Image (spheres, rainbow, N blue to C red):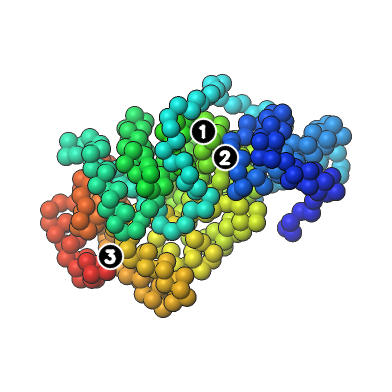
């Protein structure tokens, strides 16, 4: 569909709001019943759009008493609202909460900002380069081993990796208790706070836990939060996912939220472009995606969405180079824990236009990923990844059940396999 042209009224409003200071914009949004976070140059446009929509929607509501919001269908994904009264002209998408009295949880959050924001000044809207999806260290008794994290941060920094995604898939986030997740998050923020960008993953099976973790991440000054959707009782429609993320955002109104798209694991697959469009009006804190899928067309459309307002972090280390060719500048993954130098060279070669060298590094990375996959069939991807990290020089201990550590013999043959591809020379 071609981009919808602004109506005269919308254009006038846009002109007016553009002259507002960030403070005035915030006040206007509050008067319109919104709950905006801090407004800055990077998100001004999103908030101006939101304000325009509050104005234009109210007007439509009075002339059209019963706007119909169609639910998304699994095949088509998100659909724009249409005016019910016979007119076929599409209505600007109406904010979900204003029109749809869907049941929402009765508990409400009123976060109080207490701690000094450790990550003040880290702007994830401009995030670039590699983000390591960190492993959670466990001691041999199976308990989380926080003491290792400081050295782990140093190990990543030595590879030129300056950003971490904590408690995600690689971090066995869903295998931890909420209490453990908070401790791990706090430790990363403590040891990496001023040196690295810290994104805390807060997705879980329960909205309430997720909101609690989001609030905790905000109070402890995370640069951003990430959230995968619940994957057992899944959101049945994009609308429901939007409402879910809206609630998560309300629990951490001052912290950018990245939606974690990893359909191969969650089984939740809606159009990410539609999610971003819906976010403009309905999820003010949603500021980007962690995109772990192979659909390069969707990836690049998300990058281009809303004139490039949303950073999209690419999450398939197997084809980092392809993501760069399609416009990506940021990536998040498990192999950047131990192939940071290699992938940083890949990024550098690509920037310099040396595609041949960039491809050589990608193929090396993929040789390592083939070994990761081989041992994943024994220990799970995270168990195998922890073993490769150990071979590379940093031991974070075993994974937690149901994942298994490699046996001594298997670990030995892993090291032999890594030697055979030259891993220790180039990783
Ligand atoms: C399932 C999983 O853990 N995916 C990771 C990120 O989302 C990736 O970083 C992979 O580990 C990596 O691409 C290797 O397959
Ligand atoms: C790999 C990744 O991005 C995650 O573990 O969440």
Packing grade of label 1 (10 A; few <14, some 14-19, many >=20) is many
Packing grade of label 3 (10 A; few <14, some 14-19, many >=20) is many
Q: Is 390 placed above or below 95 here?
A: below
Q: CA distance from mark 3 to mark 2?
A: 37 Å
Residue 281: image location, x then y, percent = 67, 41
Whether label 3 lies within 8 Å of ligand 1 gets the answer no
In the rendered image, is residue 377 in sight? no
Quadrant in which the C terminus is drawn: bottom left
Q: Earlier in the sequence, mark 3 or mark 2?
A: 2
Which residue is the site of mark 1?
252
Which residue is the site of mark 2?
285
- Disc 1, SS: loop
The reply, left or right, for residue 281 in relation to residue 66 is left
The reply, left or right, for residue 131 in relation to residue 141 is right
Residue 300: image location, x then y, percent = 57, 61
- Of the pair 402 and 160, the residue shown nearer to us: 160
- Of the pair 405 and 386, the residue shown nearer to us: 386
Circles 3 and 2, Cβ within 8 Å, touching? The answer is no
Q: CA distance from mark 2 to mark 1?
A: 8 Å
In the rendered image, is residue 26 in sight? yes
- Residue 427, label in figure: 3
Name which quarter of the figure residue 243 lies in: top right
- Disc 2, SS: loop
């Amino acid at each position: 569909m071609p981009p919808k042209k602004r109506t005269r009224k919308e254009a006038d409003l846009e002109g007016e709001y553009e002259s507002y200071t960030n403070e005035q914009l915030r006040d206007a949004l509050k008067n319109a019943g919104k709950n905006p976070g801090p407004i800055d140059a990077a998100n001004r446009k999103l908030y101006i759009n939101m304000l325009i929509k509050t104005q234009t929607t109210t007007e439509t509501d009075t002339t059209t008493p019963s706007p119909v919001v169609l639910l998304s269908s699994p095949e088509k994904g998100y659909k724009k609202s249409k005016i019910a009264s016979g007119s076929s002209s599409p209505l600007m998408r109406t904010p979900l909460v204003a029109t749809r009295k869907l049941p929402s949880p009765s508990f409400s959050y009123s976060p109080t900002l207490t701690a000094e924001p450790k990550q003040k000044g880290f702007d994830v809207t401009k995030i670039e380069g590699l983000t390591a999806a960190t492993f959670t260290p466990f001691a041999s008794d199976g308990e989380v081993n926080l003491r290792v994290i400081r050295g782990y941060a140093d190990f990543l920094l030595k590879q030129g990796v300056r950003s971490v995604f904590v408690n995600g898939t690689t971090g066995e986030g869903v295998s931890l208790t909420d209490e453990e997740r908070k401790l791990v998050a706090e430790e990363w923020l403590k040891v990496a706070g001023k040196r690295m960008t810290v994104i805390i993953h807060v997705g879980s099976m329960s909205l309430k836990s997720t909101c609690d973790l989001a609030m905790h991440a905000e109070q402890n000054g995370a640069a951003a939060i990430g959230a995968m959707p619940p994957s057992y009782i899944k959101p049945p429609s994009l609308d429901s996912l939007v409402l879910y993320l809206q609630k998560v955002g309300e629990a951490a109104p001052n912290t950018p939220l990245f939606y974690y798209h990893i359909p191969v694991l969650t089984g939740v697959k809606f159009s990410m472009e539609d999610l971003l469009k819906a976010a403009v009006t309905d999820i003010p804190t949603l500021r980007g995606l962690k995109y772990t899928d192979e659909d390069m067309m969707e990836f690049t459309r998300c990058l281009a969405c809303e004139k490039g307002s949303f950073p999209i972090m690419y999450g398939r280390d197997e084809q980092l180079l392809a993501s760069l060719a399609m416009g990506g500048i940021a990536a998040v993954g498990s192999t950047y824990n131990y192939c940071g130098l290699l992938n940083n060279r890949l990024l550098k070669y690509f920037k310099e236009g040396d595609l041949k060298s960039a491809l050589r590094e990608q193929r090396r990375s993929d040789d390592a990923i083939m070994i990761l996959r081989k041992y994943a069939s024994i220990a799970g991807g995270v168990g195998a990844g922890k073993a490769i990290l150990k071979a590379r020089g940093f031991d974070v201990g075993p994974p937690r059940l149901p994942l298994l550590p490699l046996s001594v013999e298997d670990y030995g043959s892993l090291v032999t396999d890594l030697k055979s591809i030259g891993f220790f020379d180039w990783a």
